[in-house]
Amino acid sequence: MSLLKIQYILLFPLALLLIAAMACGDDEPTAAPTTAAPATMAPEATMAPEATMAPDATMAPEATAAPTAMAEPTATPEAMDDGLAERLTIAINNFDKDDLDPYRSGKTNLASPDPFADFLIGITRDNQLTNVWGWADSWEQIDGKTWDLTLREDLKFHDGYGFADAADVAEIADLWTTDEAVGSQCLYCGTWVNLYDRAEILDDHKIRIHLQSSYPLFFNILPPIGGSDLFMFSVDALNDGGGTALGYENLSAPGTGPWDFVDRRLGQYFLYSRWDDYYSPDFRSNYKEMELVLASEDAPRIALVQTGAAHMANSSGPFVEEIRAAGLEVDGAKMVDNVYGNFYQSYDEGHCTNKLNVRKALNLAVDAEAIVDALWAPGTATRISHPYTSPFVESWDPSLGLYGYDPDEAMRLLEQEGCAGFDIVVYGFAYAAGPEMLDMQDSICTYFNAVGVNCTFTPIDATAVRPLRQEEKLGSADGPPHSGAHWIPSARNFGEMLRSHGLCPSRGGSVCGMAQQDKYLALKDEYATEADAVVRQELAKRVSRMVFEEYEGGIPIASRDWIWAIDPNKICGWEPIDGTAARPMWNTVVPC
């Protein structure tokens, strides 16, 4: 029996008792939920921004003891006269960057800013552009460096902040290039600052974007394809709030999304209400409210759903059997992302991980197949060749194969390179998008130690590591090499995969994952500016093979499904993603 399963057995009954105790005294019966009308689908099945729900002020979760914040059970949703269910409660493991910053937050936080913000262009479930949602009603390429966007005229902001127009787009486009944006959690700001030249306002609802150079994949970064985080919001509200995340939040974080921010409590919950004036009636929620509550451990999250305190909860692979045993259903997007262990600052020649044979040895030291079997239920994860490829991108080449497991050869290579017994620190943290990542990194470190590497596993909050990565403070002068768990949305275009998780911030990236920075920067730029799709695909496959043969992908583990525990008595339908396999879409949840 795995340690994770033992942990579940110990925690799950305790979680049930805690929730039952919290519910004592609430004897008033509540009406059973009735079926709400599902959202009417437009001709193109599109995915709207994430929907979230806010509980009544009297039902807000109470503070609970560390380490796991658990929401107070709320009443069973009651049917409303307008056919909407009252409340959707979602339990997640991590709020990550716990604020509502509209352009410096990035996308790793499921609680914000997705619910209240929008994108310039919407997409369908299969990653096709659509104007059913998103700010742009139409778009046109003038030439390789010039693009026109015509905006909808019904983009009403929350909280009385008027309507969005071309001036808002121009100001937001400039904000994405600022040092604070590029140096923040915003993954795509690094691409934008190197791509964007200026915005020209043609009229109130038409804007022309001028680029510094030709970029055929321009429409891969404006919509939420592969995890883009270029959100749209009320610039007036940001300015009125002093340009700060807190000031913007104090003005109720106005955006144009299907959810209006109501309240939050640090480390406990985010509350949203349905935006009745959302411009796309086909994608307004079936619920009046949504709350996202924090429960850091798997067992308490499942218990919240089983006891009715929550309707759904994200989970990790080892708990699939327990989810089903609890009478719940397992749902979620398939092959959402690639999870792997990254080598930070391996480009520094002072680190052993700068050497190809050492990177090869560390891969041969890890039994990735065993990790997949331990952390994911059968059929919920698939081994990957390296982190920068999937069946959804142009780099896909099934002939690459997989790295093997050969600890003896690993030790020989380490000895050959003079790196036997070298020190490495593996940071353990888990995003809301990957609850099992901490356990994955712990396992990787255990395998490193087995071949003589002096690996120290250090559980840490991801927000504490981010500044070190962004400021490139993990070079050999700063101590031993470091590693951390990461995930790349499997639908992200190949150039963005290389940039965001391979290149350092000083080269427009986010995670220093490659030893040969300049080489792969040039290859990324060559790929991104190649207009001929056939030539671009051939280049992507060639670069993909280089990555594989040069062990530039860290420790590739798996492409995994996103696992959610669903109460089938309360949720009778869900289209979980917006086409990217990068984030859930809660305004398509259909109550029973």
Image (cartoon, rainbow, N blue to C red):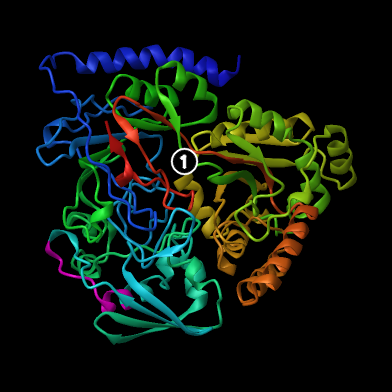
Side (left or right) of 391 relative to 82 = right
Residue 381, position in %: x, y?
Answer: 60, 36
Using the image as rendered, state which of residue 342 and residue 286 is in the foreground: 286
84 left or right, relative to 587: left
* Place of residue 586 in the rendered image (x, y in percent of width and height, measured from the top left): 33, 44
The residue that mark 1 highlights is 461
Residue 504, position in %: x, y?
60, 62
Decide: few, some or many residues near mark 1? Use Cα within 10 Å; few <14, some 14-19, many ≥20: some
Quadrant in the rendering for residue 200: bottom left
- Can residue 420 be seen? yes
Can I make out residue 262 in this image? no
Magenta region: which residues?
Answer: 160-170
- Amino acid on which disc 1 is placed: Asp
The picture places residue 490, in percent across and down from the top left corner, at 57, 51
* Viewport quadrant of the N terminus: top right
Res 166 → quadrant: bottom left
Mark 1 lies on a secondary structure that is: loop
Residue drawn at x 65%, y 61% is 394
Residue 588 in the image: above or below residue 205: above
Q: How many marks?
A: 1
